């Protein structure tokens, strides 16, 4: 997969990266080997900074996978704060549970199910929502996220540059449909008037917004 920044810039940033701890490093290697998509490390660092700035009490994540981002978020939360994370794959839930146990965290609540049915049943609002699920579901999940976000709540969305293929240019056949979906989603996103949102060229492209 192409990175969206020049290789020499990425190499430079990577050389400045302080070593992640053993568990985080192992999870990154595991995800790479098993081809499980997780948040790019640069985006994960941005998300951690957002947690430190915003100090959310209630965080919702849509798309747990192996709990890489859940663990990185949970470690930065204040005492009494927690993260609810929704995952529909039973196998990923099993993997996530193992890593969460290793991380010795008790502030991560994994909710099993499809976010499209789980989210409408949630009633308490969140201070920060991280959307990282199947791209064809993004528009509906975004609208549910808006409903579940408090005023001034932060929305963080991954993959808005879609490996560089959201921008016009040569797109491999297997990415044509998903790239078109992301393009439509981005167009809809920037014209929303209930959220102040920007698309940032970090990692695979991050949508970062604050609900009005
Ligand atoms: C990109 S991965 C999440 C990566 C994770 N946030 C991280 O950075 O470590 C997307 C995950 O979302 C799950 N997923 C996709 N659509 C979903 C939905 N509608 N409801 C619940 N889970 C979903 C997939 O099974 C997959 O595990």
Image (cartoon, helix red, strand yellow):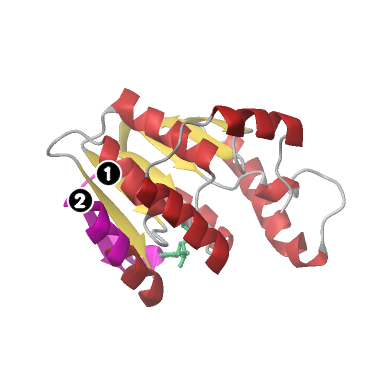
The quarter of the picture where residue 48 lies is top left
Residue 91, horizontal then vertical, whole percent: 39, 76
In the rendered image, is residue 195 in sight?
A: no
The quarter of the picture where residue 15 lies is top right
Residue 159, horizontal then vertical, whole percent: 59, 48
Asked which secondary structure carries label 1, the reply is helix
Asked which secondary structure carries label 2, the reply is loop
Q: Which residue is mark 2?
A: 105
Residue 28, horizontal then vertical, whole percent: 48, 53
Q: Quadrant of the C terminus?
A: top left
Q: Quadrant of the N terminus?
A: bottom right
Q: Is residue 89 above or below residue 40?
A: below
Where are the magenta residues, as a range?
98-125
Depth-wise, is mark 1 or mark 2 nearer the camera?
2
Spatial separation of the CA atoms under disc 1 and disc 2: 8 Å
Q: Nearer the viewer, residue 93 or 136?
A: 93
Badge 2: residue crowd in 10 Å (few <14, some 14–19, many ≥20): few
Q: Is residue 104 above or below residue 187?
A: below
Q: Give the left or right position of residue 87, taking residue 109 as reference.
A: right
Q: Which residue is mark 1?
A: 74
Q: Are marks 1 and 2 in contact (CB under 8 Å)?
A: yes
């Amino acid at each position: 997969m192409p990175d969206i920044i020049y290789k020499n810039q990425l190499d430079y940033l990577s050389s400045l990266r302080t070593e992640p701890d053993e568990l985080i490093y192992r999870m990154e290697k595991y995800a790479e080997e098993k081809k499980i998509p997780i948040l790019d490390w640069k985006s994960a660092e941005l998300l951690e900074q957002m947690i430190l700035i915003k100090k959310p009490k209630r965080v919702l994540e849509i798309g747990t996978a192996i709990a890489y981002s859940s663990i990185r978020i949970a470690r930065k939360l204040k005492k009494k704060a927690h993260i609810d994370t929704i995952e529909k794959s039973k196998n990923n839930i099993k993997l996530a549970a193992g890593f969460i146990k290793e991380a010795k965290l008790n502030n991560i609540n994994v909710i099993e199910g499809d976010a499209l049915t789980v989210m409408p049943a949630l009633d308490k609002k969140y201070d920060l929502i991280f959307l990282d699920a199947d791209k064809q579901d993004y528009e509906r999940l975004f609208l549910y996220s808006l409903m579940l976000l408090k005023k001034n709540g932060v929305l963080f969305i991954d993959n808005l540059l879609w490996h560089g293929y959201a921008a016009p240019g040569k797109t491999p056949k297997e990415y044509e449909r998903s790239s078109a979906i992301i393009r439509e989603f981005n167009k809809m996103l920037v014209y929303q008037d209930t959220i102040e949102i920007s698309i940032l060229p970090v990692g695979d492209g991050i949508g970062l917004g604050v609900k009005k």
